[in-house]
Amino acid sequence: QVQLVESGGGLVQPGGSLRLSCAASGSIFIIYAMGWYRQAPGKQRELVASITSGGRTNYADSVKGRFTISRENAKNTVYLQMNNLKPEDTAVYYCNADLSDLDRYEYEDWGQGTQVTVSS
């Protein structure tokens, strides 16, 4: 079994910064892509950023230039550095991983979510 555990959420003022972390553990053979999604109240979950095992990144237009995704493959960990935060960034942020477990079963796994609130 694989677990994704997020940390780093919280309350921040507009213009501030936060860094989210997500560590994967358990019966992992390999992790392909990792990413961050978010869901605001009354809205659908949306992709924020993703990164492949080779380091190729993809960002939502709304966060380009403000957020940076990175990962440490040896630690099965992905990060999201969020700068110049805006009230519209307020949401629950979820970690996501496309992986293969030790039985070579491939699937998509999710973390439990971490709240990010941007407010003065």
Image (cartoon, helix red, strand yellow):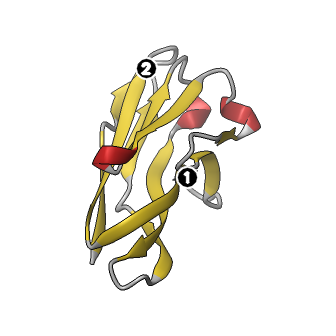
Residue drawn at (36%, 85%), measured in percent from left and top? 103
| Residue 102 location, quadrant | bottom left
Residue 56 shown left or right of residue 25 in the figure = right
Q: In this view, does 101 lie above or below 112?
A: below
Helix, strand or loop for disc 2? loop
Name the one closer to the observer, 114 or 79. Answer: 79
x, y percentage for residue 52? Answer: 58, 49
Q: In which quarter of the image is the C terminus?
A: top left
x, y percentage for residue 20? Answer: 38, 37
> For the image shown, how many numbered marks are present on the structure?
2
Residue drawn at (44%, 73%), measured in percent from left and top? 100
Name the one closer to the observer, 68 or 28. Answer: 28
Checking the image for residue 17, the label placed there is 2
Q: Dot 2: within a 10 Å radius of its alpha carbon, few (fewer than 14), some, or many (20 or more) residues?
A: some
x, y percentage for residue 43? Answer: 64, 57
Residue drawn at (39%, 46%), measured in percent from left and top? 73
Residue 59 shown left or right of residue 26 in the figure = right
| Residue 49 location, quadrant | top right
Helix, strand or loop for disc 1? strand
Residue 68 shown left or right of residue 61 in the figure = left
Name the one closer to the observer, 105 or 24. Answer: 105
Q: In which quarter of the image is the N terminus?
A: bottom left
Q: What residue type is labelled 1?
A: Tyr
Q: Which amino acid does label 2 sit on?
A: Ser
Residue drawn at (37%, 61%), measured in percent from left and top? 111
Q: Dot 1: within a 10 Å radius of its alpha carbon, few (fewer than 14), some, or many (20 or more) residues?
A: some
Residue 10 shown left or right of residue 54 in the figure = left
Q: Is residue 42 above or below residue 77?
A: below
- Residue on which disc 1 sits: 37
Earlier in the chain: of badge 1 and badge 2, it is 2
| Residue 44 location, quadrant | bottom right
